[in-house]
Amino acid sequence: MIKEAKSNYFPGLDVSIAFPQATPASIFPPCVSDYYQFDDLLTPEEQALRKKVRECMEKEVAPIMAKYWEKAEFPFEVVPKLGALRIAGGSIKLN
């Protein structure tokens, strides 16, 4: 179960109730979270990468996003984790 984020401004406020859009996508059935059937357009490798990214976001970013949102700061500590997934950085290939 995902730990519920609490607001510092409003003690006792459950962010997932106040902002249902912050609910992790893995909780929704596929027909709800893939409105345009985008998943069908991806190769198996791309689907696996999308799954890894979603798991990382839910594990590493979701628990801290309310804290950073309230402070209007960026969580730079997640950048190396995104780099490990090979989704951060340049994508231009030089000849």
Image: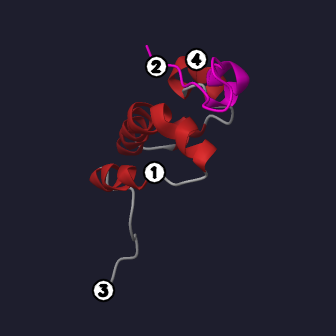
Foreground tag (3 vs 1): 1
Foreground tag (3 vs 4): 4
Per the image, the residue denoted by label 4 is 29
Task: Check disc 1 and report its element: helix, strand or loop.
Answer: loop
Residue closest to the eye, 32 or 36: 32
Residue 3: mark: 2
Task: Check disc 3 and report its element: helix, strand or loop.
Answer: loop
Asked whether 10 falls inside the magenta stretch, the response is: yes
Q: Residue at x 60, y 44 (%)?
A: 69
Confirm or deny contact between disc 3 and disc 4 (CB under 8 A). Answer: no
Residue closest to the eye, 75 or 70: 70
Q: Which residues are magenta?
A: 1-22
Per the image, the residue denoted by label 3 is 95
Disc 3 versus disc 2: distance between alpha carbons? 47 Å
The three-letter amino acid code for the residue at tag 4 is Pro
The three-letter amino acid code for the residue at tag 2 is Lys
Disc 3 versus disc 1: distance between alpha carbons? 34 Å
